[in-house]
Amino acid sequence: MKPSSEEEEEAVRGVGPWDECFEVAVQLALRAGQIIRKALGEEKHVSTKTSAADLVTETDHRVEDLIVSELRKRFPSHRFIAEEATASGAKCVLTPSPTWIIDPIDGTCNFVHRFPTVAVSIGFAVHQELEFGVIHHCTEERLYTGRRGQGAFCNGQRLQVSRETDLAKALVLTEIGPKRDPDTLKVFLSNMERLLHAKAHGVRVIGSSTLALCYLASGAADAYYQFGLHCWDLAAATVIIREAGGIVIDTSGGPLDLMSCRVVAAGTREMAALIAQALQTINYGRDDEK
Ligand code: IPD
C-alpha cells in the first residue's frame, strides 16, 4: 500500500508512523478524563437517542467537541467518526484517509448514575486498518493503549490476554445494547443462558463496552461478545486486544467488520469460536448504513 505524505514526512523526521497522532491522542484522552471526572458528581442534563436506555449528556458533547476541534487544528486533512456527531446525522464511513474514531464518554448510562466505570475511547485508522487505540478509564486513572505491532499497555505495564480455551472455565463479559423490545431482550437473555448452560464461570455486564474489552485485554476475563455496539465502542479496544495477543471477530465466526455492530473477542481463537457458536443473532443493522 502506498504510504501517505504524512507517513513519508514522519519517516524523513526519523519518527515512527503516526507517533505524533498517538501522543496527541494520549494528551486529549487525559484532558477529557479530567472533565469527565469533575462532571461525574455534578448535576447533568440527560437526553435520549435511539431508545430510552441510549443516553447522552452535555458532557458527552463537550468532550467530543474538545477532542475533535483539537485534532482538526493539528491534523486538518484527517477525517472523523464520532459518536455524538453521528447521532446528529453525520455519515459514518471509513475511507482509506487517516480517520479518528471517537467515543467521548463510553458508559454514559454509568456516568449519569455516577457509577464510576466510564471511559474516553480514541481509535485511529489509516487505509481502513486500525493503527492505534487509546482508552482512558477516567475514574481509576488507567490509561490503556495499543499500537499496531508495538504491544498493548495499561499505565506502562504490558497487557497479556488469558490463554483459556475451555468455556466451562471462562469468565465472559457482555453488554446489553440499547434495544429493549421484548424480542431483543428474549434473545439477549437466551444468549446469556446458553453460556451459563455451557457452565461458564460467570457472565458480567459492567456498563462500558470499551472498559470490558480492556479487562479482556488485561487477562481479567476470557471472552466478550455483544450485538449493538458501534465502531466508536470497538475501534480503540480492538487494537489493544490484538496487541495483547487476543482475537476480535464477527459473531458469525468470520473476520471482524467494524461497522457491523457485532463482535466476539477472546484471549484464544478456540474460545472466540465457542462463544460465536453459542450465540443467536440480534440484528442492529450497520453503522455505515444509518
Ligand atoms: C454504550 C456502552 C454500553 C453498550 C452500548 C454502547 P455509550 O456506549 O458501551 O455498555 O451496551 O452498546 O453503545 O453510549 O455509553 O457511549
Image: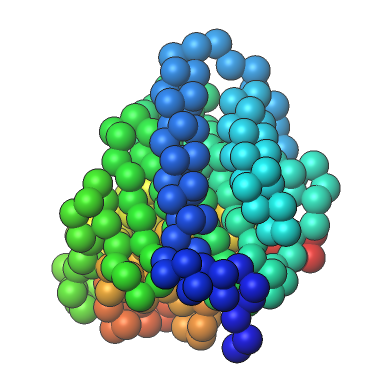
Residue at the front extreme? Answer: 12
Q: Image quadrant for the C terminus?
A: bottom right
Q: Is residue 172 above or below residue 198?
A: above
For this rendering, which residue is in front, 170 or 63?
63
Q: Is residue 289 left or right of residue 84?
A: right
For this rendering, which residue is in front, 247 or 189?
247
Q: Is residue 190 visible?
A: no
> Looking at the rendering, which quadrant does residue 128 occupy?
bottom right
**Residue for point 72% across, 59% down:** 77
> Looking at the rendering, which quadrant does residue 193 occupy?
bottom left
**Residue for point 28% across, 74% down:** 245
Q: Is residue 153 left or right of residue 149?
A: left
Q: Is residue 8 visible?
A: yes
Q: Is residue 148 left or right of residue 5?
A: left
Q: Is residue 204 above or below residue 19?
A: above
Q: x, y percentage for residue 82? A: 66, 49
Q: Is residue 63 above or below residue 171?
A: above
Q: x, y percentage for residue 159? A: 22, 61
